[in-house]
Structures are given as structure tokens and as C-alpha cells.
Amino acid sequence: MTLQTANTHSVMIRKSRHKSNDGKGVAPLVGLLPLAALLLIWQVFGNPHSVFFPQPNRWFAAIDSLRQQGMLWSSILATASTFIQSMIVATLIGTALGMALGSIQWGGRALDPLLDFLRNLPAAALVPAAAIVLGTNTKMALVIVVFSSVWPILLNTRSAILNLSPVLSSSITNLGLGGFRRSSVMIGSALPGILLGVRVAAPLALIVTLLAEFITNLPGVGALILSAQQNFNSAEVYALLLVAGVLALVVNSIVSAIEASVLHRHGPTTS
Amino acid sequence: MPELIKQDEVVYQVLDLSVNLRRRGQERVILESLSFDVLKKECLSIVGPSGTGKTTLLRALAGLVPYSGSVKFHGETLNGPASDVVLVFQDYVNALLRWRTVQKNVALGIEGRIPKEQCQERIDEAIETVGLQNYRDSYPWELSGGMQQRVQIARALAMKPKVLLFDEPFGSLDAMTREGLQDELLRVRSVFQTTCVFITHDIDEAVYLGDRLMLLSGSPASLTFELDIPLGASRNQILTKESGEFLGYRHQVYEQMRKAHGGSQATG
Ligand SMILES: Nc1ncnc2c1ncn2[C@@H]1O[C@H](COP(=O)(O)OP(=O)(O)OP(=O)(O)O)[C@@H](O)[C@H]1O
Ligand SMILES: [Mg+2]
């Protein structure tokens, strides 16, 4: 079941990767034009005194005031640092566990119910539990984010390893590769699957990072959003929404860039 | 005295080899009680109907499947993957690493094991032997099927193995490419003097390449026919294949193959 969903995912996402490669990175920017147009219309026809729908120029003023208070960059940095650290840890753990599960003969399928249970635990529900155990600190945010984003990487790695051709593993054995060298060849061959997991995990990790900051008020963009909302500063809320959106875009294009630079070696029809 | 010399010339001594494989809880005897020798520097062709167990036999010789009976490699009982024995698979697409260049694929079995310079020398030599010097930095998926199979052969040659085991290596290639590679293989053998076991379902190919031929058939599979093919070391696609001797051998094998097929159909 889980493998199947991972596989359908892989097909869809791989297609989109090739599409964006064809556009040579221009497509996402062109694709943003409707949003820019919407903001422009909002600016031109919006009500300058609206409390709930402030015009975009007020958003930018809000961002600027945050910047002047020295809150903007430090918050973005805090969020980015939690996000990046968790992605690195999640990738390492997910790849290692995925390889281990994929390498045992029954593929760890007996563990599927447990894996399904764990990966479907909503991150928001985990935060209080983690806060009790670990306290409200960045370490706890890290644990929450890793815990929620490790699954796509783990499951995709496992299915990539399970789908490796028996001919490949026979030839690795036949050439006398063992231990580290064997693992590195396996990782290399499973890399498209691992990166697919990373691609699915990255936006998830960003969402959960913001969520953790939001719930626990740890420094970061999430906490800024929370305090803006509590102060009824709607312009700032919208502005931070925009910031979060830009962060998501940046994350997405970094992942795409990594994927493209690694996977061009694997050729056009990676199975 | 002659006994001693003979021992020296034997690469594989197979006695009463049986292989059972288990699939979905059911154990089946695939190979039953095979006995044969593989001699130094010879090319032993093995033919047989599809699904008899040719691949299984080759995997046993490479030490990749558990067996019962005795397989001695250079006088020592084989248990576990044999070193100095390289398998060339029919499925070159999956045998090669698609994310490594030709050069890096050829390096796979030797990198990190011998000094760098020597490693590079061997890679170059192997790549030149199969005529891919202009494609060192290409990826396998950029090459034709025949070229990819040559990469796999180069990877095997770079190991400088004592024995090359070929499992229908040219099976999925067109006739012209296949004949080209057959001649390349003859040439490589005359240079490296490597012992070969060559599996194919193509009788012409088996006779053309082999110094000796064995027929594997039945279920469970056993050796049902053996033939010496003293056609000499220099063989030629046109002249050899038109010679009376060649046609004679081919005829014999063909007849035995037909018998084996009829037999297996009657029992199955
Ligand atoms: N891992 C396995 N477990 C159980 N049975 C197997 C396994 N691999 C192969 N077999 C069975 O063993 C028999 C021999 O298979 P093998 O691949 O050795 O045949 P082959 O002679 O190489 O056939 P072909 O010419 O089609 O390649 C087949 O009936 C096959 O179903
Ligand atoms: Mg076979």
C-alpha cells in the first residue's frame, strides 16, 4: 500500500521535474505572473483603510518595519536553520533506515502497519508531547520536524532498494564488492528514489518548522506570524505569508537544482 | 605423471553438482548430478532449452547459489562468491551502473584495490580492447546495446579474471552486432588466454566460439551430450561457418537439441 502510493508519487513528480527542466528555470517565474497580477489589482482597487484586506504596499511597509526592528532576517535565519538541519538529519536517517529495511529479504513489510501509524501521526498533535518530553526549545522543534519529514525519504529509499535489479546485486557480489563499497553502489543506484523522497519531504519539513514555531513561539517566521496575528496586524500577517511563500519557492528550487545536478547522470528514463 | 599435469590444467572440477532452488516455499531440484571439468584456456559452450537451468549452473560456478556435491575451483572447494571469476550478464542494462561513465563502470571491480596508476592502465587497456576509447566519458544510456555489452565485457576484462562466465551475452543484440562481438571475443581470448564458459541458445554461436560443447536438458537438468570442437584458434565468420567440419558439428548439436526439446515436451 505505502509502496504503491510512493510509486504513483514518483511518476507524477518525475514528470514535473522534466517539465521544469525543459523550461530551464524560467517557467516558475513566468508561472508567478498571475499572482503578481492579482497583487497589482489588489493594490489598485483595494480599500486603503481595510482592516482585513490591507493593500500590498502596506505589506511591504510591514516587512520593512520588521526589518528595521532587526526581526526579519534573524527570524528567517532561525527558520532556515531549523529547516536545513532537520532536512539533513531526516535525509541521513531516512536513507539509512530505508536501506536497511530494503536490504532485508522481506523488505520489512511486517513493519508496514507500524510505519503507517507513525508517519500518519499529525505533527500538530506531536508538538505538545514533544514539549513535555524535551521542553520548548529548538532541539524539540528539530525532533518534530525530523520525525514528520523522515517518512517519505525512508519509504522511497526502501522501495528504491527493493526495486533494484537482482542482476545488479549479483554483479556487485560477483565483482567482490562488499561493505562500504557495496553500500555506496546501492545508494548511487537508489539515488533517484532517495531524492524523490527528499523532494516530498522538503515542503513538509518547512510546514512543520513553521508550525512548531507557531505553536511553541520559538523564534522564527512562524512566531512572527503568531505575534502579528495576536496584535491584529493584518498587513504583517499577509506580509509574512508572502515571506513563507517565498521560502517555500526557494526550498523547492534548491531541491530541484540538487536533483537536476545529481540526476543528469542517471539518464532520461530512470526506472 | 600425466595425472599431475592434468590436475594443473583443470580450472573447475565439478562432481555430482545439484542445485535446489526455493520459490514461494516450494523447493525444486533445478540441476541434478552434473559432473564435468573446465580446462585451462578452453572455451566451453553450454547450450540447452530455455528454462533448463543454464543461468543457475553459471551462478553456481560463480559461487552465487548454494549447491550440493562438489565444485572445485583450482583444486579448492568453492563456497561463497568465487574471486577471479567474472560473470557477464545478458541484461547489460541492469548490470552496468547507469550513473557512472564508461570509464567508471569499467573501474568498478578494481578501483581502490590496486594502485591508481595501475588501475588506470588496466581500464585503458580494457576499454581499448573492446574499442570504446572514444566513449570513455559517455554514460551507458548514451550508448547502443552492443556498445553497452562491450562496456560490461571491458569491466570483466579489467579484473583480469582467471575465468569469464558468459550468460547469453549477445542474446538481445542484432545479428551483425552479435557476429562482431563474437569475433571480438575470439580475439580477446587469443590475447588474454582466459578460460571461458559461454552459455547461449544459439547453436551456431556455441559451435563457433566453443572448443567444447555441452548440452544441458531435462527437468531437473542434466548433461545429455558432449562434443569436442577442434576447429582451431583462428576462426572466421564466413569461412569457418561454411566449412564442412563446422556444419557437421552444428548438425550433431542440432539433432541432440531437437531430441532434448522433444523429450522435455513429452515429459512436460
Ligand atoms: N531464484 C529462483 N528460485 C526458484 N526457482 C528459480 C529461481 N531462479 C530460477 N528458477 C527456476 O529454475 C529454472 C532454471 O532457471 P534458469 O534461469 O537457470 O534457466 P535458463 O536455462 O538460464 O533459462 P533461459 O535460457 O531462459 O535463460 C527455471 O525453471 C526457473 O523457473
Ligand atoms: Mg538464463
Image (cartoon, coloured by chain):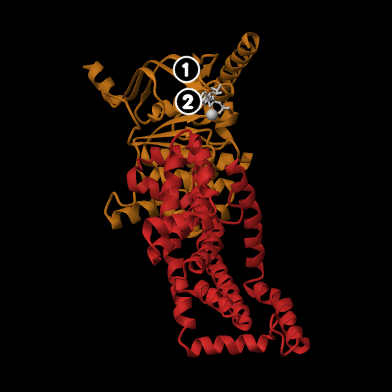
Q: Quadrant of residue B241?
A: top right
**Co-location on one chain, circles 2 and 1:** yes
Name of the residue lying farthest toward the top: B267
| Location of mark 2 (residue) | B56
The chain whose colour is orange is B
At a point 58% along the width and 15% down the height, the residue shown is B256
When the figure is inspected, residue A26 is found, relative to residue A3, above or below; the finding is below
Name the secondary structure under disc 2. Answer: helix
* Tint applied to chain A in the drawing: red
Reply above or below: A189 against B79.
below
Checking the image for residue B31, the label placed there is 1
Percent x, y for residue B141? 56, 53
Circle 2 crowding by C-alpha within 10 Å: few under 14, some 14–19, many from 20: some
Expressed as whole percent of the image width and height from the top left, the position of residue A17 reads 62, 62
Q: Is residue A120 above or below residue A173?
A: below
- Residues marked 2 and 1 touching at CB (< 8 Å): yes
Query: Looking at the image, can residue A201 be seen?
Result: yes
- The amino acid on which the numbered mark 2 sits, given as a three-letter code, is Thr
Residue B12: x %, y % from top left: 34, 24
Q: Does ligand 1 reach within 8 Å of label 2's beta carbon?
A: yes
- Residue A39 image position (x, y, % from top left): 71, 82
